[in-house]
Image: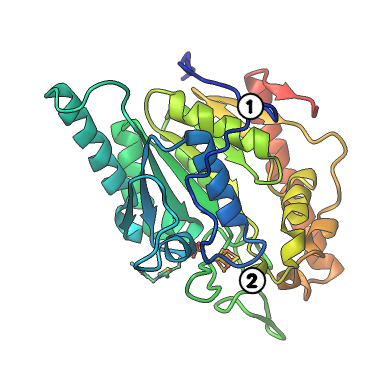
Amino acid sequence: MHKEIQFPGFKKITAKNMPWDKVVASGHRACQGCGEILAMGMVMKAVGRDAIVANATGCMEIVTSPYPQSAWECPWIHVAFENTGAVASGIEAGLKALHRKGRVQGEMPSVIAFGGDGATADIGLQSLSGALERGHNFVYVCLDNEAYMNTGIQRSSSTPWGASTTTSPAGSKSKGQRTFKKNMPAIAAAHDIPYVATASPAFHLDLMNKVRKAVSVEGPAYLHIYSPCPTGWRCKPEQSIEVAKLAVTSKVFPLYEVIGGEWHLKKTAKPKPVEEYLKTQRRFRHLTPDDIAIIQEHVDWEYARLERLAAMTDSVEDEE
Ligand SMILES: Cc1ncc(C[n+]2csc(CCOP(=O)(O)OP(=O)(O)O)c2C)c(N)n1
Ligand code: SF4
């Protein structure tokens, strides 16, 4: 059902008023060209220091917090895969209680939860679903690098069809991952929460303004951020932003928002063939032209479904 959604206090980020403060400091231990750390840095730049972060197990937790060091310049807690949503809920409920009792006053900090695709779409899905359903005022960010990277490139339910991972290896009897990517943003949207969006570090202003909307909206918000992993995808570190851009322009990872049940799609004017995207990564190098045709058909089908959802709410925008 359509709901009128407000973004109180939303302040748009432009190239001119880009915040200087980093919140996630340099000197962390992420690999070169890591899309997750780029995306996480952008999210925190947009949110600012007035935040409490719950960070699930995974690459981003490991590379930013090797004891006794920390890249975090705001309150931060490490959480397990399965309870990220629950811990974020507890932080938000605790803040509300302290506020009610007068023990904290003024603006409440933003509560942000980060998880990889394994943490989000697989192991932590249950507690995330509970947190979304109970309506906690927090932002959940899925940093999607399409596998369990921290433990050595195992497939997740977010791994795309045909990708070779250590647990879906391509070989003479296998084409790699046998299932299509789980549609996690649609699962979040099905909870009827105020705000869901997909974003990419290749479109940094779009990403940061979606973050600003997510923190300003009252209630749960879910952001699904495409995050290239040169180590696991076998692509060049210096090309990870190019890969992220190609994912959007080939319709593999479309950018859209779901605001109060309305789907707003930023349409790709002249889509590139998926083959251009696939050939940037060695995890797809074994695919035959027939396999690529299967992927293209699936991408077109998914995109047409998005267009229909957006058209139902008159929200298809042409590319800028
Ligand atoms: C319940 C549970 N199972 C397995 C592990 C081991 N483990 C630690 S990190 C990780 C992979 C994380 O994958 P993802 O959430 O996609 O994050 P990424 O490392 O790719 O950023 C696994 C399986 C764990 N910590 N807890
Ligand atoms: S393995 Fe991938 S996700 Fe993890 S730090 Fe390296 S590039 Fe980033």
Q: Secondary structure at mark 2?
A: helix
User: Dividing the image into 4 quarters, which one contains the C terminus?
Assistant: top right
The foreground one among 114 and 291 is 114
The answer, for residue 272, to whether it is visible in the render is yes
Q: Is residue 125 left or right of residue 89?
A: right
Question: What residue occupies the far left of the structure in this picture?
Answer: 101
Q: Earlier in the sequence, mark 2 or mark 1?
A: 1
Mark 2 vs mark 1, CA separation in Å: 33 Å
Q: Is residue 268 left or right of residue 211?
A: right
Which residue occupies 79% across, 36% down? 268
Residue type marked 2: Thr
From the image, tell me which residue sits under label 1.
17
**Image spot of residue 133 (x, y percent):** 33, 35
**Snapshot colouring:** rainbow
Which residue occupies 36% across, 59% down? 81
**Image spot of residue 177 (x, y percent):** 62, 69
**Image spot of residue 93 (x, y percent):** 22, 34
Q: Is residue 277 above or below residue 310?
A: below
The residue at label 2 has a CB less than 8 Å from ligand 2: yes
Q: Is residue 136 left or right of residue 175?
A: left
Which residue occupies 52% across, 26% down? 213
Q: Is residue 140 above or below residue 243?
A: above
Question: What residue occupies the far bottom of the structure in this picture?
Answer: 172
Instruction: Give the label on residue 231, or none.
Output: 2
Name the quadrant containing residue 67. Answer: bottom left
Instruction: Give the label on residue 171, or none.
Output: none
Marks 2 & 1, CB-CB < 8 Å contact: no
Which residue occupies 47% across, 15% down? 6
The answer, for residue 183, to whether it is visible in the render is no
For the residue carrying disc 1, how many other residues have a C-alpha within 10 Å: few (<14), some (14-19), or many (20+)?
few
The foreground one among 97 and 125 is 97
Residue type marked 1: Asn
